[in-house]
Amino acid sequence: MNRRRFLQTTSTSIGALSLGLMGCAETTEAPVETPATPSAVIAPLGVLGVQLYTLRSLLADDLEGTLRQVAEIGYRQVEFAGYYDRDPQDLRAFLDDLGLAAPSAHVPLNVFEAGAGDALEAAQVMGHQTLVLPWVDRNVYASVADYQRLAEQCNRFGEACQAAGVRFAYHNHDFEFDTVEGQVLYDVLVQNTEPGLVDLELDLCWIVAAGYDPLEYLNRYPDRFTMYHVKDLNAEGGPATVGTGSVDFPAVFEGDEAVDIRYYYVEHDNPADPMASIQASYAYLRALEA
């Protein structure tokens, strides 16, 4: 199931505090490759997290067992993409027992448009510091005027989050980097959102897929980015296990010193073996560190 369909089928349960989500590519990776041994060494990244959308097929069958495996790999943070009909109080208690924190969660556009009341209440219980808008329909948001309107919406969502004591952030795909009417749509969005209200979660796979160097944008807007989706790009233009694709992670991590990246979430949209993918990604990133 791709992210758009996942959003459509799960976001209706937000009233029951099941935060449905997202929208992304539909490429399915071949069986998990073994990442190459890193040839570069970087400074330690610190705490690593995983975007749980990666594991949605496993979580739907065994949420508790899957989260336990995530913790056993070594991850200490998770970013939610739905609560799978679990009560936030119970889920938070289980995370605490595992030594896992959930600094952020993805929340679909229609929930923000409706005021995000339940999502904000759940954030208080779960300990989410940021709620992230993960996806917008490229057929609805396609022009400069559309992105100016989206920026206004994001500012309002940021105000609502701020009033509840949490942050709001926007997560990119590749299509936000389309050039329309002589302007890159992502620039329109960033330049028309308030830094005090709207943070940015940079998906490293999708910005590279769009043909841009992540460092170009990190240096252009150094005060805006607070989170990464650490995701690789395969030869077909889709997501890959970290360390098996074309994203130059050492260059990004060495060159982002001026940017306050607080959270590193490993992600793969459609892995053939989700648990093997996040395990290989974790091993690659730890081997990359000095």
Image (tube, helix red, strand yellow):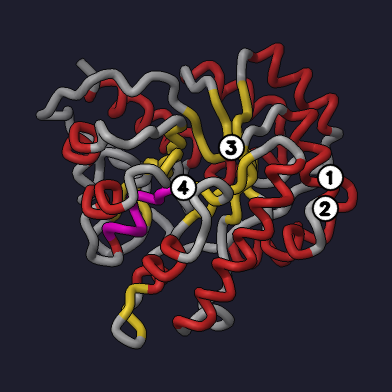
Looking at the rendered image, the quarter that the C terminus falls into is top left
Please name the residue that numbered disc 3 is placed on.
Answer: 79
Please name the residue that numbered disc 4 is placed on.
Answer: 201
Q: Decide which of tag 2 and tag 3 comes sooner along the chain.
A: 2
The answer to whether residue 96 is left or right of residue 48 is right
- Give residue 56's position: percent from left, percent from top: 62, 45
Disc 4 versus disc 2: nearer the observer = 4
Give the extent of the magenta segment.
201-208
Q: Is residue 203 magenta?
A: yes
Separation of marks 1 and 4 at Cα, in angstroms: 23 Å
Residue depicted at x 75% and y 43%: 163
Q: CB under 8 Å between callouts 2 and 1?
A: yes
Disc 1 versus disc 4: nearer the observer = 4
Q: Decide which of tag 1 and tag 3 comes sooner along the chain.
A: 1
Q: Is residue 60 above or below residue 211?
A: above
| Count of labels in the image | 4
Secondary structure state at the residue bearing disc 4: strand
Separation of marks 4 and 2 at Cα, in angstroms: 22 Å
Secondary structure state at the residue bearing disc 3: strand
Q: Quadrant of residue 175?
A: bottom left
The circle on residue 14 is 2
The circle on residue 17 is 1
Q: Decide which of tag 4 and tag 2 comes sooner along the chain.
A: 2
Kind of residue at disc 3? Glu
